[in-house]
Amino acid sequence: MTYLELALIAFILSIIFSIGGVGSAIAIVPIMGWLGVPLMTAKPAGLFINTLSMLSATLKNIKHGKLDHRFGLPILVLATSMAPIGAYASKFIPKVYVLWVFVAFLLYSGTMMIFFKPKKRESNENHVIEGSLIGGIAGFLGGLLGVGGGGIISPALIMLGYEPKKVAATTALVVFFSSLSGFVTYLGMGTLNWKLLLWVSIPAIAGGWLGTHLMHFKMSSEHVKKVIGVIMYLIALKTLLMVMG
């Protein structure tokens, strides 16, 4: 697998996953693993891609007035704080256990995206408590797995009745900061492949911008959820076969 091919994968997945504000590392990390990239190299690369693609998505959301900063703040603070702890903990957890957590993570996210039909929420009451709890869990697992935590944040907020496009904009902001804090932790651990990061940087930014444009102007909320859910299921199946094989 060449760097050019990895750059193309980063571009395509950044488009798809920025549509839901999730961050494409949830797919890129296991795909890199299948292609022979060591897990401790793939995880910081995934967080780096998330950081760039979600920065691009967030700037576009701000430009078009789609971001509710107050709603996302509690999630952001806890996710950003817990991501470095999860990243550091990954040094002590065997790879096979990490992959099993990955499978469970993907199946949960995919199920929520495809099958859950939430009732519309009437108010934002208690969103600080809910957001802090969701952000803390998502940040730790996002750092541990190198995925940024969007796969927990987005389905959980949708399950609680928040509007999917508002959730996507909020999750993109949170995933940017949590991925950045997790990436900096891996940087300190010395597991980075700088040539790989250079190759995927521009495709990640371009994919994040394009995916956010499609989400706001071309796709319905239901389509956003189902596309991402199906992809998560497929990646979970492939990862499960790899673990069991």
Image: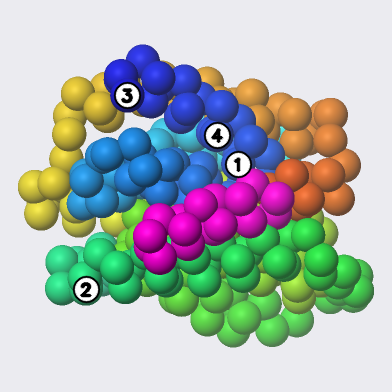
**Which amino acid does the dot numbered 1 rest on?**
Phe
Q: Is residue 128 above or below residue 217?
A: below
Who comes first in sequence, dot 3 or dot 4? 3
Which residue is identified by label 2? 93
What amino acid is found at the position of numbered circle 3 in the picture?
Met
- Gap in Å between the C-alphas at discs 2 and 1? 27 Å
Distance of mark 1 from mark 4, alpha carbons?
Answer: 6 Å
Expressed as whole percent of the image width and height from the top left, the position of residue 38 reads 22, 46
The answer to whether residue 186 is left or right of residue 3 is left
Q: What stretch is highlighted in magenta?
A: 229-245
Question: Pointers 2 and 3 in contact (CB under 8 A)?
Answer: no
The image's colouring method is rainbow
Residue 53 is left or right of residue 5, and the answer is right
Would you say the residues marked 1 and 4 are in contact, meaning their CB atoms lie under 8 Å apart? Answer: yes
What element does badge 2 sit on?
loop
**Nearer the observer, 208 or 59:** 208
Q: Name the residue under label 3.
A: 1
Q: How crowded is mark 1: few (under 14 residues within 10 Å), some or many (20 or more)?
A: many
How far apart marks 2 and 3 lie (CA) works out to: 27 Å
- Identify the image quadrant of residue 110: bottom right
Identify residue for label 4: 13
Location of residue 109 (image quadrant): bottom right
Q: Residues within 10 Å of mark 2 (few under 14, many from 20)?
A: few
Numbered disc in front, either 2 or 1: 2
Res. 206 visible in picture: yes
